Amino acid sequence: MVGRRRARSALAGIAVASVVLAGCGLKSGSPMVDEVEPGSVGAGEPLKGASLTVTSKNFSENIILGQMIGLIFKAAGAEVLDRTNLPGSISAREAIVQGDADAMYEYTGTAWITYLGRAKPIVDPLKQWEAVRDQDRRNGVTWLPQSTLNNTYALAISKKNNTKYRLRTLSDVAELSKKDPGAVTVCVENEFASRDDGLPGMEKAYGMSIPAANIQKMDAGIIYTQVSKSDSCLLGEVFTTDGRIRAMDLDVLEDDKHFFPNYNAAPVIHTATFEKYPEIADLLDPLSRKLTTEVAQVLNAKVDVDGEDPHEVAKDWLVEEGFITEG
């Protein structure tokens, strides 16, 4: 799933995305018709008369975040076209760059590594965001302040198994791999198993060597079930904001050497749109301050575990938090 979520190796897909955008890919979409009004944001309808398009990638979390932007814009008086759920990172990115969409939530690590072509992530989250913000200006993309929501890689273990091993950090895993190599079995996706910013790089950074026989490759969704309910994998590759972490009672191990990149979510705005409507910052900054990894886990679980609609999940949470009210 990481390949679909972050498209780190998909720079070649820009040409494909351009064809999609030029063809039918961004012709679809539907107006947001919700009767919503300002709450803690949007007083005085600062976007009244604006016609704005929101977009997102095609996984639950990013769709939820895109819906949140659209609903806040709507409450602030704008007419909003919903073009969320585009296929992959590159399509949504190109929509923002080309001005076919006005706003979405993007991830700092995705921009730094995939769009800006940097091989080495920046450890400090704020400095990572600042570097992305500064370098993406030339692409006509404006980055607003990031949230603490960090959708990055991690390894997880079931709480049941962790009563025996008491693992807290990846350094603990490295120590266990030396003391008892057979105990460290891992379930990962194919891409994570081979990439330098995945399992091989992690092993090198932490000084561990997991035998090939102890590594099982499978689809992302199966990993959570295997780690939670079977003994075939002590550890599994997860995303830190995934709702199944809580639903399946998993412990996420701390990346105490900060090997994995930061993937903090931040609003990105087509720069010409932001210059026309700078009020967007006042609308979205309070939202980003409320978005945490834990909040994302809860909201993602409503979609991925409970089967709820992302639009309704976004709307309900915005109303509960007081950002908007229902008309």
Image (cartoon, rainbow, N blue to C red):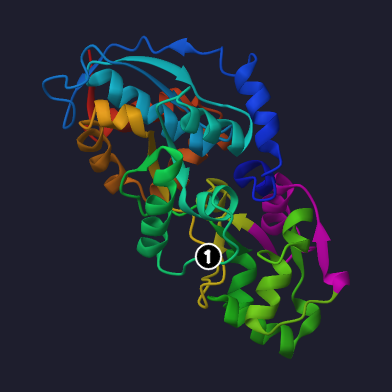
Q: Tell me the quarter of the picture where residue 119 sits.
A: bottom right
The three-letter code of the residue at mark 1 reads: Pro
> With 202 as the anchor, is 269 left or right in this view?
left
For the record, the magenta segment spans 212-237
Please name the residue shown 51% across and 28% down the image.
95
- 62 or 174: nearer the viewer: 62
Q: Position of residue 80 (x, y in %)?
A: 36, 16
Name the quarter where the C terminus is drawn: top left
Q: Residues within 10 Å of mark 1 (few under 14, many from 20)?
A: some
- 255 or 196: nearer the viewer: 196
Residue 189: tell me if it is visible: no
> With 316 as the anchor, is 174 left or right in this view?
right
- 284 or 241: nearer the viewer: 284
> With 139 as the anchor, is 187 left or right in this view?
right
Residue 221: tell me if it is visible: yes
Residue lying furthest bottom: 179
Please name the residue shown 20% across and 14% down the image.
48
Q: Which residue is mark 1?
A: 121
> With 40 as the anchor, is 290 left or right in this view?
right
